Image: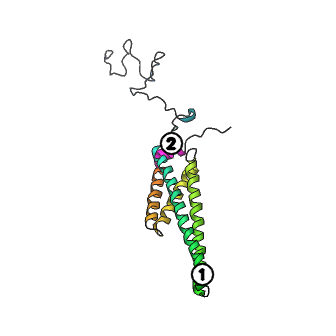
């Protein structure tokens, strides 16, 4: 008979030892542990919801700063292209070049293209600021938009400009990486506080 063997599942439990099955209730004030593994306290996050990050992760903060840097670069680019467009328009109105039809056609096309680039640079910068501002209370839609923004920015930065384009491409790739990581995903998919 194995009444005294503590490893025998059919033996009678000794006095003071819990039986098999569900863990016994611990006395009040003593944390209960189940099956030999310590229980971790529940993670309390923002707004009382469990597991919700309360502070923006460092990678997401860095991506936000990079969006502001891209905005600054867009402003610089818009100013440079606006100066170039104004110079083309001034050259077009030069009296010595008024009769050169080929130059006038090229100037019309170049001036319109330059002003189009200025408008695009301003709108792209506004979108970057919008995304950066929304990172604080952003949802998964903002996260996806930031990833798409980063992908398009990286592609556009490859061709036309050597230095500015390279900076744009590097920043855009980093934005994608930081926003797509697990902590970024948790931040943008967190339970939002109801708006009243």
User: In the image shown, does 103 or 43 lie closer to the viewer?
Assistant: 103
Question: Which image quadrant: the C terminus?
Answer: top right
- Disc 2 vs disc 1: which is toward the camera? 1
- From what the image shows, is residue 57 above or below residue 24? below
Which residue is drawn at the image coordinates 46% and 46% (left, top)?
182
Which residue is drawn at the image coordinates 46% and 64% (left, top)?
164
Give the residue furthest to the top: 15
Residue 75: x and y in percent read 54, 60
Residue 78: x and y in percent read 55, 64
What is the basis of the colouring in this image? rainbow
Which residue is drawn at the image coordinates 59% and 40% (left, top)?
192
- What range of the chain is rendered magenta? 181-196
Q: Which mark is residue 120?
A: none
**30 within the magenta span:** no
- From what the image shows, is residue 111 above or below residue 118? below
**188 within the magenta span:** yes
Residue 100: x and y in percent read 59, 87
Q: Is residue 94 left or right of residue 39?
A: right
Q: Residues within 10 Å of mark 2 (few under 14, many from 20)?
A: some
Q: Answer whether labels 2 and 1 touch (C-beta < 8 Å).
A: no
Mark 1 lies on a secondary structure that is: loop
User: In the image shown, does 17 or 33 lie closer to the viewer?
Assistant: 33
Which residue is drawn at the image coordinates 57% and 49% (left, top)?
133
Q: CA separation, marks 2 and 1?
A: 56 Å
Q: Residues within 10 Å of mark 1 (few under 14, many from 20)?
A: few
Q: According to the image, label 1 marks what residue?
A: 94
Mark 2 or 1 closer to N-term?
2
User: In the image shown, does 30 or 85 lie closer to the viewer?
Assistant: 85
Question: Which image quadrant: the N terminus?
Answer: top left
Q: According to the image, label 2 marks what residue?
A: 56
- From what the image shows, is residue 93 above or below residue 117? below
């Amino acid at each position: 008979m194995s009444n005294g063997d503590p490893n025998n599942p059919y033996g009678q439990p000794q006095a003071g030892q819990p039986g098999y099955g569900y863990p016994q209730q611990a006395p009040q004030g003593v944390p209960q542990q189940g099956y030999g593994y310590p229980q971790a306290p529940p993670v309390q996050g923002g707004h009382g919801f469990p597991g919700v990050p309360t502070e923006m992760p460092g990678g997401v903060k860095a991506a936000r700063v990079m969006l502001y840097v891209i905005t600054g670069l867009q402003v610089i680019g818009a100013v440079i292209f606006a100066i170039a467009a104004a110079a083309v328009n001034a050259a077009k109105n030069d009296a010595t070049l008024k009769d050169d039809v080929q130059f006038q056609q090229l100037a019309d096309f170049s001036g319109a293209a330059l002003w189009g680039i200025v408008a695009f640079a301003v709108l792209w910068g506004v979108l970057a600021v919008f995304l950066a501002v929304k990172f604080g209370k952003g949802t998964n839609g903002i996260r996806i938009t930031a990833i798409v923004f980063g992908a398009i920015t990286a592609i556009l930065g490859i061709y036309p400009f050597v230095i500015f384009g390279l900076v744009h491409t590097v920043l855009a790739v980093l934005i994608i990486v930081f926003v797509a990581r697990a902590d970024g995903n948790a931040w943008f998919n967190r339970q939002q506080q109801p708006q009243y």
